[in-house]
C-alpha cells in the first residue's frame, strides 16, 4: 500500500500547474470481519479497500475530490488525473475562500507497527472454542490499516498498523449482558482466553433477577467505558473552537465564564501512545500533548488551521472537524478495590448507550444504561438493574457532583467501522458522582 | 472516471465449487457543496467503485469486497470468499441454500427531470450564497449555512442462478441552518432537522421548493427561538409535524421491526427489540388509527427501489394495519430463519459491506383530519417541528426526542413559540395514544442519509413519510 501511495502521490503532483498546490490523503485497509451470533458465525468476509482524497488549491480557491484506489496503477492514475481536471474546472467557477490554508513542508514521518496478528484462516478456530456454552454475539475486525498524507511541496507522512478487535457481548438466559472488548496488535491465545474467562465470571451476577429502579437522583459510579462515552460527546458540538464560535457548543457556559468543572477533572489530547497518527488530513502534525481542561478550567479548545485563520487564533493542528483523536482524562485517588464500598448505596454503571444532547447549551446529555449495571447497597452489589434513561448535565457529573476519580486508567479503543475501521482510543478512569438523574 | 465492467463476464470466469456465486457492483459519487457564513467551505466530489463477491459454501455465505475489478482479481476474490465461507460453515448460525438469493431480472431508474450537470458548480454556489444571505436576517445570527449534496448511484447485481439487475439513482440532499446566539443562549433552526430534506430527484429541486423564502423563515425562526420561553413541563397533548414524525417512526417502529435484531444479530451493537417473533399478527402496537407501510414505490422518496441487494423484488406491504403488527422488516435470509413473512429490505451501504435487514421507506399512511382539526382537539398541548435530539434504548422502548421549534396549543389554537421542546415515552404505550392522524394535505416526505446499524458498521439512506399526528397525554419538557 505504501508504494501505491508514494507512486500515486508523486505522479499526481507532477500533473499540477505551477500556480497550483495539492494535498493528498490516503486511507486503506485489508480487513477480515466475522460476525457472530449465538456463538456461531452469522456473516464472514474480507474487505480490501483504499481511497484517496485530493484537495486542489488555485489562488484562493479550493476544491476536493476523492476516488477508490483499485491497485491498478494505470486506472488509479487516470482517476486521479480526471479528478484534478474536474477540480481545476470547479476552481474556475466557485467563489474564493478567504480562510483556506495552504500546504507547507514541515517535515515527513513514517510509522509502521509490526505485529504478529491473527491469521485470517485461523480466526474462527481461535475465537470460538472458548465461547462454547455461552450466548456470544459480536464482531471480529482483524487486519491491516493504512493512513498516508502528502502534499505538493514534498511533505509526506505514512502510518501503518495491523491489529484485531473482538467487540462482544455475553448474554444470560434472562437477557442480561456483559460487554467485552479484546483488542491489540499481537495475538496471544492464552491472553484472549483469560480475558473471555473473566467476562464469563461476570455473567454469574447477571443471572440474578434485575431490579427496577425508580426515577430520581442517585449516587453513581461510572466505569471507564461509560466515562469514555461521555467524553465522546465532547467531540460533537463540544470542544471544537468552530462549534463554539458558531453557537452550537455545549462548552459555551465554560467559555463565557458562567460555569466550570470540578478541580478533579482534567483532560488532554495525548498522542504519545501512538493509537492513531499525529498527522491530520491536511498533513499537519499536532503536539504530543495538549491540555484541554485543566483542574476544571477550559484551557484550550481544538483549533484547526482553518478556524485559526477564520477567527484570528493559533492552530493546534486539530483535524478539520475539531474532534478528539486520542483523549486522556487524568486519574484521581479512588482505588478500584474501594469503589463499591465508597459508593455504598446507588448505581454502578459499566456501560451507557445512545447518548445525545438533550440541551446542548446547558450541557445536558440523555442516554440509557446498558450491559452490566447494578444496584449497590451496604457496599455490596445487590443485583442488575432494568434499563433506565438518564438526563443530566456534564456541568454536574464532571462538575459539582463529581466526588472522586479512579486512580488508574483504562484504554478504550475506537472500534467504529463506518466507512472503514477507525483508529484512536480514549484513555480514562472511572468516576464517582454524588447525584445523577434517572428520568424514565 | 467510471470503469465499464462486464459483470456477467466476470461471473462466468469464476471457478470455485460453490453452490451459488453473486457479484454486486456499486458505483457512487457524492458531490457536496456548502456555504457557511458567506464563504464556500465544501466543494467536493468523491466516488467509490468496487465489487462484492459473495459465495455460498456448505450453507454458509462468505464474501470478499474489492476495488480491483479485473477478471484475475475477481476470480481470486471468489477463492478467498470461498475459503472464508468454508472455514465458517461448520459453525454457521443457519445453513442456507440458493433460495436465500432468489433469481430476478429487472431494472430501476429513479425519477428526475434535470440531471446532475444541469446546474454548474458556479451557479450552485451562487444559489447557496443567496440562500445564506436570506438566512442571515440580522446580526444575532452568529452562523448560517446552506448545503446541497448530489448523489449518483449505479447498482448492478448478477448471480449464478440467473439474477441480472440494474438500478440507477439520482438523489439530492438539501439543508439550511441558522444559529442565533446571545452569550450561552443559543438556538439553531434548520430545514427539516438533521438533513431530513432528502429525496430521489434531480436539480429540478431548486424549481419546486422556495429556497430563499424558506431561508428567510428559518433565519426569522432562529431569532424567535432565541427570545422564546422554554417549553413547559408536564403531561399534555402533543401534535407532531411530519419532519419529526419521521424520526418517531424510524426509531420506535422501524428499528424495532428489523427481524435480524429480533433474531439477535445486533445485540452487541444497536441492540435487541421488545418485539418477539410470536408478536406478529397479534401485538396491538398502536391505536386503530395507525397504519404503517414498507413502501419502496412512493415516487421521489429517498429509499425507493425495485429490488433489494439480495435480488428480492420490492413491493409495498403493510407492517402495522389498524394498529396491529402484521409483518416484520426481514429480507429473504431473515424470512428463512424466522419463518415469518417479510419485505425486500436486505440492503448494504456499499460494495464493501454485506447486506443486512434495513429500513427503506417506512411510512405512516394518511388519515382524515385536517391540520386545523388536529389542533382544535387540543385544550393544552405543544406542536413540535424538526428533530434535533434522539435517543432510545437497546430494546427500542424508552425514547426521548428533542425538537427545534415548538408552539403552545391553548384551547384549540396555536399560540406562542417555545424553545427546547422535548418529549419522552415508551414505544407501544406512545403509539396507542395516537388519537388523530392528519390527511394527505398534512403529509410530508422526509428521510435521513445517516441511519447507522450493523457490524461492521453501515450507514444507509432511508425515507419516512407521514402526516401530522396528535398524541394524547405525553410527557413533555424544556431545557435546563
Image (cartoon, coloured by chain):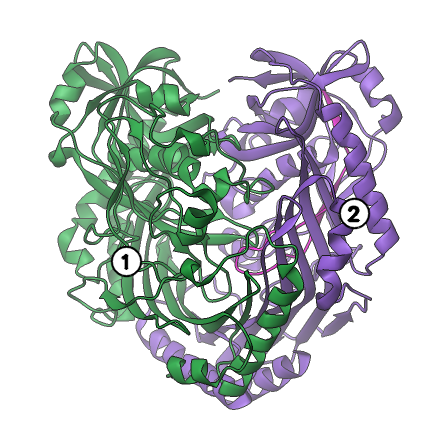
Q: Nearer the viewer, residue A401 or A133?
A: A133
Q: Quadrant of the N terminus of chain B?
A: bottom left
The secondary element bearing badge 1 is classed as loop
Res B305 label: 1
Tell me the shade of chain B: green
User: To which quarter of the image does residue B473 belong?
Assistant: top left
Q: Can residue A252 be seen in this view?
A: yes
Residue drawn at x 23%, y 27% as measured from the top left: B322
Pointer 2 residue: A130
The CA span between labels 1 and 2 is 43 Å
The secondary element bearing badge 2 is classed as helix
Range drawn in magenta? A412-433
Q: Nearer the viewer, residue A132 or B251?
A: A132
Within the magenta stretch, is there residue B68? Answer: no
Q: Give percent across and percent down for residue A87.
A: 39, 76
Please tell me how many numbered marks the rendered image carries.
Answer: 2
Q: Give percent across and percent down for residue A43.
A: 57, 56
Label 1: how many Cα within 10 Å (few below 14, some 14–19, many 20+): many
Q: Quick check: B453 above or below B16?
A: above
Tell me the shade of chain A: purple
User: To which quarter of the image does residue B11 belong?
Assistant: bottom left
Viewer-nearest of labels 1 and 2?
A: 2
Residue drawn at x 51%, y 65% as measured from the top left: B352
Amino acid at each position: 500500500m505504501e508504494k501505491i501511495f508514494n507512486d500515486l502521490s508523486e505522479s499526481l503532483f507532477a500533473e499540477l500547474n505551477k500556480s497550483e498546490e495539492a494535498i493528498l490523503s490516503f486511507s486503506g485497509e485489508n480487513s477480515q470481519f466475522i460476525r457472530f451470533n449465538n456463538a456461531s458465525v452469522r456473516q464472514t468476509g474480507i474487505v480490501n479497500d483504499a481511497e484517496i482524497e485530493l484537495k486542489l488549491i488555485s489562488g484562493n480557491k479550493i476544491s476536493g475530490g476523492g476516488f477508490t484506489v483499485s491497485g491498478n496503477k494505470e486506472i488509479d492514475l487516470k482517476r486521479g488525473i480526471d479528478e484534478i481536471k474536474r477540480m481545476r474546472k470547479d476552481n474556475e467557477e466557485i467563489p474564493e475562500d478567504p480562510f483556506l490554508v495552504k500546504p507547507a513542508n514541515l517535515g515527513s514521518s513514517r510509522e509502521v507497527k509490526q505485529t504478529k496478528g491473527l491469521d485470517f484462516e485461523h480466526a474462527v478456530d481461535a475465537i470460538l472454542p472458548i465461547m462454547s456454552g455461552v450466548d456470544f454475539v459480536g464482531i471480529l475486525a482483524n487486519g491491516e490499516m493504512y493512513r498516508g498524507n502528502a502534499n505538493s511541496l514534498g511533505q509526506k507522512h505514512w502510518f501503518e498498523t495491523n491489529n484485531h478487535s473482538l467487540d462482544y457481548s455475553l448474554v444470560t438466559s434472562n437477557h442480561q449482558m456483559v460487554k467485552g472488548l479484546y483488542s491489540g496488535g499481537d495475538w496471544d491465545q492464552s491472553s484472549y482466553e483469560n480475558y473471555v474467562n473473566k467476562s464469563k465470571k461476570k455473567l454469574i451476577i447477571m443471572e440474578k433477577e434485575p431490579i427496577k429502579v425508580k426515577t430520581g437522583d442517585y449516587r453513581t459510579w461510572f466505569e471507564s467505558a461509560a466515562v469514555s462515552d461521555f467524553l465522546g460527546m465532547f467531540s460533537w458540538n463540544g470542544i471544537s473552537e468552530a462549534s463554539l464560535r458558531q453557537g452550537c457548543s455545549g462548552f459555551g457556559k465554560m467559555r463565557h465564564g458562567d460555569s466550570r468543572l470540578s478541580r478533579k477533572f482534567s483532560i488532554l489530547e495525548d498522542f504519545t501512545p501512538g493509537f492513531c497518527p499525529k498527522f491530520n488530513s491536511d498533513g499537519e502534525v499536532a503536539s504530543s500533548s495538549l491540555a484541554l481542561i485543566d483542574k476544571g478550567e477550559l484551557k484550550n479548545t481544538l483549533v484547526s488551521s482553518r478556524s485559526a485563520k477564520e477567527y484570528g487564533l493559533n492552530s493546534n493542528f486539530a483535524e478539520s472537524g475539531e474532534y478528539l483523536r486520542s483523549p486522556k482524562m487524568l486519574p484521581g485517588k479512588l482505588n478500584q478495590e474501594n469503589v463499591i464500598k465508597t459508593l455504598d448505596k446507588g448505581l454502578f454503571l459499566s456501560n451507557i448507550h445512545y447518548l445525545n444532547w438533550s440541551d446542548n447549551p446547558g450541557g445536558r446529555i440523555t442516554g440509557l444504561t446498558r450491559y452490566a449495571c447494578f444496584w449497590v447497597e451496604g457496599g455490596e452489589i445487590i443485583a442488575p438493574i432494568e434499563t433506565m434513561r438518564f438526563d443530566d448535565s456534564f456541568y454536574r457529573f464532571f462538575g459539582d457532583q463529581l466526588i472522586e476519580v479512579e486512580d488508574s486508567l483504562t484504554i478504550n479503543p475506537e472500534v467504529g467501522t463506518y466507512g472503514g475501521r477507525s483508529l484512536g482510543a480514549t484513555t480514562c478512569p472511572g468516576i464517582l458522582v454524588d447525584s445523577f438523574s434517572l428520568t424514565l | 472516471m467510471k470503469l465499464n465492467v462486464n459483470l456477467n463476464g466476470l461471473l462466468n470466469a469464476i471457478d470455485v465449487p460453490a453452490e451459488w456465486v453473486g457479484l454486486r457492483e456499486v458505483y457512487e459519487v457524492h458531490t457536496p457543496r456548502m456555504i457557511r457564513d458567506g464563504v464556500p467551505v465544501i466543494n467536493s466530489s468523491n466516488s467509490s467503485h468496487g465489487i462484492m463477491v459473495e459465495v455460498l459454501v456448505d450453507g454458509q455465505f462468505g464474501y470478499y469486497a474489492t476495488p480491483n475489478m479485473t477478471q484475475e482479481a475477481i476470480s481470486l476474490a471468489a477463492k478467498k470468499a470461498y475459503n472464508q465461507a468454508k472455514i465458517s460453515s461448520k459453525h454457521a448460525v443457519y445453513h442456507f441454500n440458493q433460495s436465500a438469493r432468489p433469481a430476478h431480472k429487472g431494472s430501476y431508474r429513479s425519477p428526475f427531470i434535470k440531471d446532475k450537470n444541469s446546474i454548474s458548480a458556479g451557479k450552485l454556489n451562487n444559489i447557496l450564497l443567496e440562500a445564506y444571505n436570506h438566512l442571515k436576517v440580522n446580526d444575532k445570527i452568529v452562523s448560517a449555512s446552506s448545503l446541497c449534496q448530489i448523489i449518483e448511484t449505479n447498482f448492478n447485481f448478477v448471480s449464478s442462478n440467473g439474477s441480472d439487475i440494474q438500478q440507477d439513482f439520482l438523489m439530492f440532499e438539501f439543508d439550511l441552518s441558522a444559529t442565533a446566539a446571545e452569550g450561552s443562549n443559543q438556538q439553531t433552526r434548520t430545514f427539516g432537522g438533521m438533513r431530513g430534506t432528502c429525496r430521489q430527484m434531480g436539480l429540478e429541486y431548486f424549481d419546486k421548493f422556495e429556497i430563499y423564502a424558506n431561508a428567510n423563515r428559518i433565519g426569522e425562526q432562529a431569532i424567535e427561538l432565541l427570545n422564546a420561553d422554554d417549553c413547559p413541563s408536564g403531561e399534555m397533548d402533543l401534535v407532531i409535524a411530519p419532519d419529526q414524525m419521521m424520526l418517531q417512526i424510524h426509531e420506535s417502529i422501524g428499528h424495532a421491526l428489523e427481524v435480524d435484531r429480533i433474531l439477535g444479530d445486533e445485540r452487541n451493537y444497536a441492540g435487541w427489540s421488545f418485539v418477539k417473533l410470536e408478536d406478529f399478527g397479534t401485538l396491538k402496537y398502536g391505536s386503530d388509527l395507525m397504519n404503517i407501510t414498507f413502501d419502496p414505490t412512493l415516487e421521489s422518496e429517498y429509499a425507493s427501489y425495485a429490488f433489494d441487494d439480495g435480488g428480492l423484488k420490492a413491493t409495498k406491504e403493510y407492517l402495522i394495519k389498524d394498529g396491529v403488527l402484521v409483518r416484520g422488516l426481514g429480507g429473504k435470509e431473515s424470512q428463512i430463519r424466522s419463518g415469518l413473512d417479510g419485505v425486500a429490505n436486505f440492503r448494504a451501504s456499499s460494495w464493501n459491506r454485506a447486506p443486512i435487514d434495513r429500513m427503506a421507506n417506512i411510512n405512516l399512511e394518511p388519515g382524515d383530519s385536517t391540520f386545523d382539526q388536529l389542533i382544535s382537539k387540543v385544550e393544552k398541548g405543544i406542536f413540535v417541528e424538526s428533530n434535533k435530539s434522539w435517543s432510545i434504548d437497546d430494546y427500542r422502548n424508552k425514547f426521548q426526542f428533542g425538537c427545534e421549534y415548538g408552539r403552545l396549543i391553548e384551547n384549540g389554537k396555536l399560540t406562542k413559540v417555545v424553545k427546547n421542546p422535548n418529549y419522552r415515552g415508551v414505544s407501544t404505550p406512545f403509539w396507542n395514544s395516537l388519537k388523530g392522524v392528519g390527511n394527505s394535505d398534512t403529509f410530508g416526505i422526509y428521510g435521513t442519509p445517516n441511519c447507522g446499524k450493523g457490524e461492521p458498521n453501515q450507514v444507509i439512506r432511508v425515507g419516512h413519510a407521514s402526516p401530522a399526528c396528535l398524541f394524547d397525554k405525553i410527557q413533555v419538557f424544556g431545557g435546563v
